[in-house]
Image (cartoon, helix red, strand yellow):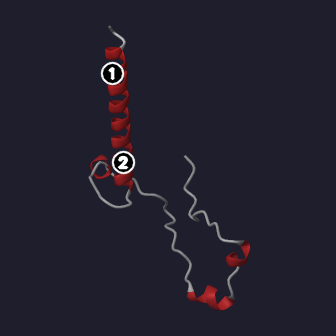
Amino acid sequence: MAPANPVPFDSTPDSDLNPSPAVAAADPPAVVDPSGPQPVSQEELNEWRRGFTPQAEIWNGRLAMLGLSVGLTVLLVARLATHAG
């Protein structure tokens, strides 16, 4: 698995990528953990956390798949029930 890119996508124009020396000196560089991402336990990964967290994104995906499955099942049952007669 390739390591994650430490620099997020930046849609600013090229002129903003080279700030003046005064602005560059005021903003300290971001600290990147050299050891990389840390593994988490299965219990922590399945916790119900609110906000923009990996756990919330996992539960969002799970509930979206559940909702899609239930919706498709209801449509299938309704279609079979109306065409049975």
Residue 35 numbered mark, or none: none
Comparing marks 1 and 2, which lies closer to the viewer? 1
SS at circle 2: helix
Q: Where residue 25 appears, x then y in whole percent?
A: 61, 88
Q: Which residue lies furthest to the top in this view?
A: 85
Residue 60 numbered mark, or none: 2
Q: Where residue 64 appears, x then y in whole percent?
A: 37, 41
Q: In which quarter of the image is residue 52?
A: bottom left
Of 28 and 70, nearer the camera is: 70
Of 78 and 7, nearer the camera is: 78
Q: Where residue 58 appears, x then y in whole percent?
A: 37, 48
SS at circle 1: helix
Q: Is residue 68 above or below residue 15?
A: above
Q: In the displayed structure, does residue 36 sit left or right of residue 73?
A: right
Residue type at numbered disc 2: Asn
Q: In which quarter of the image is residue 61?
A: top left
Instruction: Give me the C-alpha separation between circle 1 and circle 2.
Output: 27 Å
Which residue is under mark 1?
Answer: 78
Q: Say which residue appears at 59% left-offset and 65% top-offset.
A: 7
Residue type at numbered disc 1: Ala
Query: Is tag 1's residue or tag 2's residue first in the polypeptide sequence?
Result: 2
Q: In which quarter of the image is residue 82?
A: top left
Q: Which residue lies furthest to the bottom in this view?
A: 22
Q: Say which residue appears at 42% left-offset and 57% top-offset.
A: 38
